[in-house]
Structure formats: C-alpha cells, structure tokens
C-alpha cells in the first residue's frame, strides 16, 4: 500500500510550487511532469536529466505508483485482454480491440462494479474501489503499447466500457480524460473517446453543464421501464423518461448525439414489439442505436438473439428512420467481449 503521497496526484502547478519553495528552479517541475505523463517512467531513477540528489529526494518524499500486466491473452480474432495489477494488489481488466486500422482501447473505471445488470459478468463482482486518474491513464498507455507491439498501428479510439460505472467515478474519469487529451499527456482527440453509462440522469445533466467534448453512450437494453428494471435495477431510480430528458439536455448543451447501446436477448427484448418501442423512444432525442450481440456468461439466464430476429429488429428500426449498426462480438474465446469482464 502507498505510504507517501502519489506524485501523479499533483498538478504541474502544485509541483512547481513544491519545488520553488525548496529552492529548485521552476523548470524542474516541467521536467518531472514530462517524465511522469509523457515518458511513462516507473521509477525516479529513470529520470536521467534530473540530478541524483533530487531523484533521491523525490524517492524519499513521494510514491510513483504504476500498474503492470498480470496476464495478457490474445484472441483468435486479434483482441487482446489484459489483467492489470494495481499498487494495492487489486486487478482490473482492459481490452485492445483491433478492426483494420482502427485500434480501440476498452478501459475500466472501477475495480468491480456496484450495479447489478443481470446480463453482465462484471456485475457479479463486488465493488472494491474507484480507480484514480493515473490508473485510468495507465490502462490507455498499456493498451496503446500493445497496439504498436501486436499490430504496428497507433491507438485510435478509447471507450469507457470496461469494468465499473464511469459516472459513479466522475471526477477521476474526467481528470483522466483531461490528461489523455492534453498535449502534455497523450494528446488524443476527445472526439475519439466514448463514455458508456448504465444511466445516471443527474450525472448526464452534469456532463451537459460541463460541456464535455467526448461522446456519450447510454446502455439502454430495453425501451420500456418494466423490462429495463428487470435487467437493470438502476432503472428504478433513473427511469426512461428521466434519461430521455437528461440526454436531451446533454445534446442541446454539447451538440453531440447520444448512442443507445442495446444488447439483444432472445425472447426478452428482441421482439418486433420491442423494436417498435425502441424506435418510438429514439424519436425523443437525436441518436444512434448500436445493437450488440449477447455474449454468454457462466450460469447466465439469457441467450443471444437469432440471426433472423436480429435482422427483423434492424429492419423495423431502419424503416422508422433510426440510424442503427450491429456490433459483432470480439474476443469471446478469452472472455473479452462486451459484458464478459470478470477477472476470470
């Protein structure tokens, strides 16, 4: 466990104040900041343009925490799943999803999850803690290195669709995204980042008020409160009407249309009636629909929709003018597909 302050919890301005108060030139803070966030060092001794006495001083005053891969698995389709050990021994998972020149990092925001969505393996884990900004950032760094190593292609996209509910760790997630998109960090475009939420209306309002520049995906999975509450208890306190109002506020504040994620569960939410209910819901706010193949989990009560019914579902949405795409599962053989992350 950490016994000293984590140096990466300090901003550049705070580091500058710390060093100038100790008689060091202000540019030292900039040097060290670059080592921490752009050169991704794991030890103070790796800061080669910093004097040995100052490195020793840093070692005595700060911890430099980092995560490291515990296991790495590669699927037959190229998907790479990593179990990453944190400084306290806890483990999170991240996934690299390759598709042509598109390299997507699926990132976790919490250790475990406090929600109980019945079709998701992560929901079976106990909620352990929130991830800190540097732990979220380091996942992206790790997956970015894997993209180069395995495919000789840079990381192009980030999705917060891994373990945990990002809006229940809002401050740390926003801080991590700020660093990921900052020129002094990874310099990625916020338009290449998508945050996926199970639906916390007040936090979606806050995202709109904060005028975030990244994209929003809402895990809908049913277009009636009765069905959605059966598989997502969070709907009891965040109804579809509440979410529609929040998403409209987000759209009007940011100009970004939301993506509704909808996992197709055979004979539960994939009927023609369900498709028509979803089409009506989509009229309320400019949106896209991303249909997702269900990925089985051990002992799960659901099965994937048939190809025929999936096609019918898509046809109904498209006839209603809804923009819809179908996301095929990736990494199923290593339990890396959507809903399967559970630290096996």
Image (tube, rainbow, N blue to C red):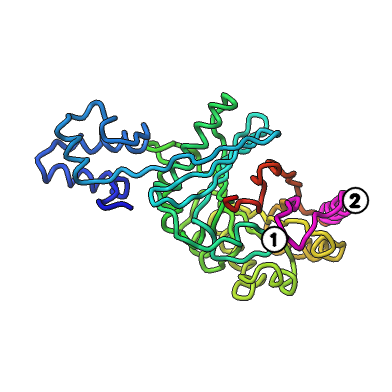
The circle on residue 119 is: 1
Between circles 2 and 1, the one closer to the viewer is: 1
Residue 307 painted magenta: yes
Q: Residue at x 20, y 40 (%)?
A: 58
Identify which residue is drawn at 68% across, 64% down.
118
Report the span colored magenta. 291-319
Q: Earlier in the sequence, mark 2 or mark 1?
A: 1
x, y percent for residue 326:
76, 47
Dot 1: few (<14), some (14–19), or many (≥20) neighbours within 10 Å?
A: many
Q: Which mark is residue 58?
A: none
Classify mark 2: residues with Cα within 10 Å, few (<14), some (14-19) or many (20+).
few
- Give the answer, above or below, for where 9 lies relative to 58: below
Q: Tell me the residue at 54%/57% (across/down).
A: 164
Q: Are marks 2 and 1 in contact (CB under 8 Å)?
A: no
Q: Extreme top residue here?
A: 152
Residue at 26% x, 31% y: name it: 45
Q: Secondary structure at mark 2?
A: helix
Under tag 1, what secondary structure?
loop
Which residue position holds label 2? 308
């Amino acid at each position: 466990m950490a016994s000293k302050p984590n140096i990466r919890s300090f901003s550049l301005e705070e580091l500058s104040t710390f060093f100038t108060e100790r008689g060091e030139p202000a540019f030292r803070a900039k040097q060290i900041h670059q080592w921490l966030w752009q050169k991704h060092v794991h030890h103070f001794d790796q800061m080669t343009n910093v004097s040995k006495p100052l490195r020793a001083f840093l070692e005595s005053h700060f911890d430099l925490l980092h995560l490291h891969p515990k296991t790495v698995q590669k699927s037959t389709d190229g998907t790479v799943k990593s179990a990453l050990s944190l400084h306290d021994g806890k483990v999170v998972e991240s996934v690299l999803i390759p598709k042509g020149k598109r390299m997507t990092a699926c990132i976790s925001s919490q250790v475990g999850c406090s929600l109980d969505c019945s079709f998701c393996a992560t929901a079976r884990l106990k909620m352990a803690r929130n991830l800190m900004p540097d732990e979220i950032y380091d996942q992206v760094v790790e997956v970015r290195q894997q993209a180069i190593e395995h495919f000789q292609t840079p990381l192009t996209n980030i999705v917060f669709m891994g373990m945990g509910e990002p809006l229940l760790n809002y401050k740390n997630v926003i801080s991590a995204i700020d660093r990921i998109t900052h020129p002094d960090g990874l310099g990625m475009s916020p338009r290449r980042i998508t945050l996926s939420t199970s639906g916390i209306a007040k936090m979606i309002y806050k995202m709109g008020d904060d005028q975030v520049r990244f994209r929003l995906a809402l895990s809908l999975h049913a277009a009636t409160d009765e069905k959605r509450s059966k598989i997502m208890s969070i709907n009891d306190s965040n109804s579809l009407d509440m979410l529609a109002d929040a998403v409209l506020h987000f759209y009007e504040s940011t100009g970004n249309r939301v993506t509704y994620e909808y996992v197709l569960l055979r004979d539960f939410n994939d009927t023609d009636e369900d498709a028509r209910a979803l089409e009506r819901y989509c009229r309320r706010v400019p949106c896209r629909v991303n249909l997702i193949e269900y990925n089985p989990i051990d002992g799960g009560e659901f099965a994937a929709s048939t190809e025929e019914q999936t096609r019918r579902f898509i046809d109904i949405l498209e006839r209603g003018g809804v923009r819809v795409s179908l996301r095929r599962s990736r990494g199923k053989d290593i339990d890396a597909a959507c809903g399967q992350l559970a630290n096996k």
